[in-house]
Amino acid sequence: MSLVAIKQCMDKLLAELQLAQPGNHGPCIFCGSKDAVSTWRGDDGACFHCKKCGAAGDVINAVALKEKISNGAAIKLLTGENYRPACRPQSVIRPIAEPVPPSPNKRKLDAIFAQAFESVLDGCADDAIRRRGLTKAWLLRSPNLGYLPDDCAWVIRVSMPDGRAVALKLHRDNPKAGQPKSQWLRLGTEPADRPRHGFSTLWPPPEWHPDGPLFVAEGELKAAALISAGFSATAPTTGAGFKWTPGGVARVAGRHVVVVFDHDQAGNTFRINTVAALTGAAASIKVITFNISDVKGACA
């Protein structure tokens, strides 16, 4: 059966989802919900969506999620053949470049972060710390997160595994009109014509938390809350659009990974991309939403 025919076949999708018939209140094999899955026939074929966990797509996505494999591998599993679109030019292998760390103005970086961390020390950030579910004890033990009360902004100290700070990222709790929610502070010095300020990496470095399941959260402050609660966690510094490179994958290879995501478009993109990138490298992969019961269950 061709791939087009497989995607059109509702019976094939229902079989993969373990559903008896199409409808709007089916059980979900991904999250265990008893009545959250809807199935229907769209323009491109049979489709599904779980209103609880956000799993969605066609039969290819269903197989990829169920088997924890890429969409390409799912197509081969369904058809027995490698997928190549018609008239596709011969592929060219382009190595994925590893991001280059910025070279910051260290004096300026240290001065800004010292001001933000002073708010943690003197209690000016206590309310913000509580709202985020963080613990002051962890912040004091690991000084990589500060707060600027006047701007209602967190200052994230982005470091290399050896502890060397290379960038500062600002995250505003309540940005004013015209202000970005997140931004990199302009601290780079190289190259001189277009200095780098941001750095696509993992924060905090997963090497700092070698024990237990590694929670990979969608954002740094979620990772901070998980670490404050006693778990090992990290997050991409470039949000849901984070692109996993071979070097990034190698940093978490062999770990039991738990991907933590929000039920929205960005969160589901993050979940799908992270599972696809880490499949085969991580010792195991679980996917959960960001609530304490799911977190505890992932460690059971």
Image (cartoon, rainbow, N blue to C red):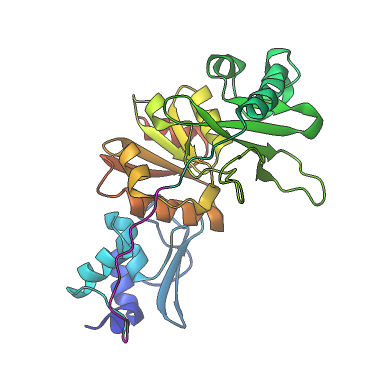
Which residue of the protein is positioned furthest toward the left in this rendering?
Answer: 80
Which residue of the protein is positioned furthest toward the front in this rendering?
Answer: 192
Q: In the shown orientation, is residue 16 left or right of residue 194?
A: left
Above or below for 123 versus 274: above
* Residue at x 78%, y 34% (from the top left corner): 151
Q: Which residues are magenta?
A: 86-98
Above or below for 213 versus 175: above
Which residue of the protein is positioned furthest toward the bottom in this rendering?
Answer: 87
| Magenta-drawn stretch contains 66 | no
User: Is residue 215 visible in the rendered structure shown here?
Assistant: yes
Where does the N terminus fall, quadrant-wise? bottom left
User: Is residue 17 visible in the rendered structure shown here?
Assistant: no
| Magenta-drawn stretch contains 92 | yes
In the rendering, at what x and y percent does residue 149 appear?
Answer: 77, 27
Q: What is the count of numbered marks?
A: 0
- Front position in the image: 110 or 261: 110
In the rendering, at what x and y percent does residue 106 appear?
Answer: 60, 28
* Residue at x 45%, y 37% (from the top left corner): 294
Tell me which corner region of the image, top left, top right, bottom left or bottom right, holds residue 78.
bottom left
Q: In the shown orientation, is residue 117 left or right of residue 177?
A: left
Q: In the shown orientation, is residue 19 left or right of residue 23?
A: left
* Residue at x 70%, y 17% (from the top left corner): 118
Mostly what secondary structure, the magenta segment?
A: loop
Where does the C terminus fall, quadrant-wise? top left
- Front position in the image: 110 or 243: 110
* Residue at x 43%, y 81% (from the top left corner): 44
Tell me which corner region of the image, top left, top right, bottom left or bottom right, holds residue 152.
top right
In the rendering, at what x and y percent does residue 188 appear?
Answer: 61, 40
In the rendering, at what x and y percent does residue 197 appear?
Answer: 60, 43
